Image (cartoon, rainbow, N blue to C red):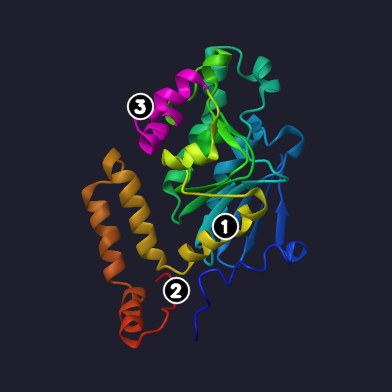
Amino acid sequence: MVARPPCAELRSCDRRADSLTKSPVAGELKTHIDGPVGFLIIDRPENRGAITRTMWEQMPELLSRLAGHDEIRVVVISGTEGCFIAGADISEFEELRSDPDLARRYDAGSRATLETLERLPVPSIAEIGGPAVGGGCLIAFGTDLRVMAEETHMAIPAGKLGLAYPHHGLERLVAVAGESIALDMTLTGRLVGAAEALSLGLVHRTAPAAGLRETTHELAGRIAVGAPLALRYLRLATRRSGRGILTPEEISELSANCFASSDYREGLAAFREKRRPVFKGR
């Protein structure tokens, strides 16, 4: 069996949009699977992807379900029609986030989403095709890698609204950007364009809006051909060991699983035989 080039599994996505396996769910979230990549799509273009409490509550299960498919190697979160996530839906705040107790209940969904992204067994990518504001940044920074359209921006304007940005979101922002940049973004609430976001390390790739999907697919394809157990170890050990969520014993076990796997033997054999390896995740 000859493995396909890194992005071969994905190049047909745009050409065969109507043939993708799609499964709409309650709220305005959609999922589909294309080859080794699972997609979670925020489908609220009329609200620029603003997220409701119901959507926050649904995200953890949908992400876990996508990542749990045997064939999935990468999860991509994106919006539709030039959108990403323009924050939480403020129209709900008066009813659902109007006092400290309600705010804590409301923020439980974003906390669970961030924790789910942290613990996914596969890498994740945010495809930022429109403004990533407030909760949009929380989700974007919750992923492992970020690809951003050159024409858009990100911002955390909580100070301008008088609200407390979720602490778990601030922790992740500091982990990604460092304290200095995190303070600049949050205290000013200013817009950060794609070029600056790239220079600050907030995103990993930028592309014109017309080429954003292709850039994301290429990145996902490069990841998808890697050995799943090794990728799981790399992302979990890198993201969590510094925060003490994984014990040294757990990290050691993840490492041992790699060396005990048939994928490790396949990788060595492919290197010796000068061919592309075919990994099976075991």
Which stretch did the figure color magenta? 169-189
According to the image, label 1 marks what residue? 215
Q: Is residue 263 above or below residue 22?
A: below
Tell me the chief SS of the magenta region.
Answer: helix
Residue 20 place in picture, x, y as percent: 71, 63
Asked whether 19 falls inside the magenta stretch, the response is no
According to the image, label 2 marks what residue? 280
Residue 61 place in picture, x, y as percent: 57, 46
At x 39% / y 30%, what residue is drawn?
171
First in sequence, mark 2 or 3: give its number.
3
Which kind of residue does numbered mark 1 sit on?
Thr
Which kind of residue does numbered mark 2 sit on?
Lys
At x 61% / y 13%, what residue is drawn?
98
User: Which disc is residue 180 wearing?
Assistant: 3
Image side of residue 253 versus residue 173, left or right: left
Residue 96 place in picture, x, y as percent: 64, 20
Q: Is residue 160 above or below residue 218?
A: above
Q: Looking at the image, which is closer to me, 108 or 216?
A: 216
